Amino acid sequence: MTQIQVEPDVNTSDDEDSSDSSDILLNWAVGRDVGRGVGSAPEGPRLLRLIGGPGSGKSRLLAILRHGSDARPAGPTAQVRIDATVSAAGQSAATVAWELGRQLGYGPLDPRELVARVADDPDPVTIVVADLHRAGVGLPGNADAAPERLAPAAEIAEQVLAPLLQLPHVRIAAETGTIELLSNVVEAVAGSLDIDLGPGPGPEKEAPLSTDEADAPPLGPGSDWAAVGQHERDRALATAGVRDRSRLLTDPGYLVHGSPVAVTAALADPQTRAPGRLRRAWAAAAPALTTPGIDAVERAALLHAAALDADKALATYLRPLAATHAWCARWCQPVDGAVTLTAMADRLALVDAEGRISFFDADTGEQGDVIAADPDVRPGSLTAAADRLLIGAGSDGTVHILGPNAPSPAAVAVAARHNLRTLADEEARPLALDGGAGVPVTVACADGRVHLWPLDGAPMRPTTYQAHGLPITGVAAVDPKDGPLLVATGSLDGTVRLWDGHSVTVMPVPSTRRGVVPTALAAIDSGSGPVLAAAWSDQRICLWHLTSGRVSVVPWLGQVKALAFHVDDGIPTLSVATRTTLTAIALRPLPW
């Protein structure tokens, strides 16, 4: 086992020590083996531990590491790349994994899913974990935890860091404070690079409670949590006994305004008495609720959406506040492995993992007819060609006519044309479809091309355009009353492009570009202009008002498989399909 320990030199100044330590840190970050010199191959330890007491400078060194490529280049061409940085202070294994997933572009994932996604991604990954020794501080349940439960720092090490370090392309720098922390991980990965900064001057003294804080009555269920400071809200749960903690979690106001990390920890503690329905609703919403920067109203909207399926009583309590947000869920139905979705008149058609097509009332979510699965037809994309007539594209690129109505000659011609193209060239296979009343059937293909097929009796010649250089992952078409036909496409290149479907004029630059992949698109002509919804692989949905350019970002409750728009009582309503749920959310009029 290789273990390199770097300690301060008693004959050097603090500034010189800091410089030496930061050089070692930056050399490690670019993959250089400290024990073999600057020019050596990247064969050094993949785990680096920053050890030292309070005030010893660990946080300052991590800041240098995060900004190393700008502040202190590690070589003439070497660049320091940090892919994710998370503070473990006051966190649990689940919340650390969620934040790492967000920063790595996967969206919030539980520890096992995170490790699996990183394992499937061959790119090198460097992760910084600050304050690991302060994990769990201030969370409820730590003081009275059962003896068999792991301490939060050990839980993070066992469930997140150790499995990640089993992957040869992962490097982790962790602020551990003591040499004992991560000792088991060090043995498993055959060594670490330890930078020991010594005991330090000690922690800063905490300010005493003010007279008002000391004399304040204890807070409990029914308190005006919106008027209470964050510190007081956190303290109310952290200092509560098991019985009071359980009572506090029955207060919907606290669930909305309290710390999502603390509530997650409390509900994860088996000693906390809480209804199973609350635990299910919170488990569905918690990863999105911990998204940085969201306010109490958005938390209410997210928790309300999750509770519609799991805890209807909680959903009823939350609805008045959720309804003031830019969007509010109207209904939610459980589904079994959603694959794709489309809107048709007043219904939604959803294809599940078994190939069944289920129809839902668009206004109420009530499930209606089901078309049995055909082993030869497994649509991966779906669109409505007419009322009760669907066109589906399978994973092999074959286009099928589906539904109880007799197929129109135009729809048959579209299917035949694309099936012939796929036989001649596999790269021409259809991957995404869109269409509907007054909109051409839009077929987007693996070769990056989009084909617009009119089904209104016009000559059956498609309008074709090369939209992307990589396969298309989603397409949406909308024909606004006051403007040209607009077509939006998303691709594996991480872009969404918008173009005029009549003149085939594409915006010269992508409408949006992110470091993740768009997974589904949908568009509608709302009362205030066309709106595009784009779901991304990091579990976010971007709602884009195309006329004004306004964008609202929604952290959704799971990986989005498909989107579909319809109008409900004059209100644009977006249906969102994940693997396990189908949820309809109504959009509030602009501005949002």
Image: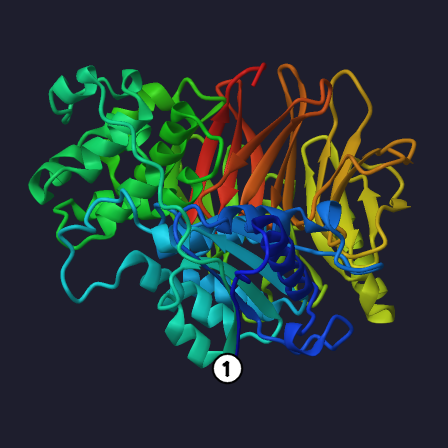
Residue at (56, 50) in percent of width and height: 14
Please name the residue shown 71% across and 64% down the image: 398
- From where the camera sits, is residue 538 visible? no
Q: Residue at x 78, y 55 (%)?
A: 445
In percent of width and height, residue 153 lies at: 34, 59
Compare residues 505 and 175 and report the one nearer the observer: 175
Residue identified by numbered label 1: 190
Image-based side of 25 in relation to 328, left or right: right
Q: Position of residue 569 (x, y in %)?
A: 48, 19
51 sits left or right of 417 in the view: left
Q: Nearer the viewer, residue 208 or 14?
A: 14
- Most extreme residue toward the front, as rendered? 11
Quadrant of the image occupied by residue 546: top right
Residue 302, image x and y in percent?
Answer: 40, 34
Could one spot residue 149 in this view of the protein?
yes
Q: Is residue 24 above or below residue 183?
A: above
- Locate residue 454: give its quadrant: top right
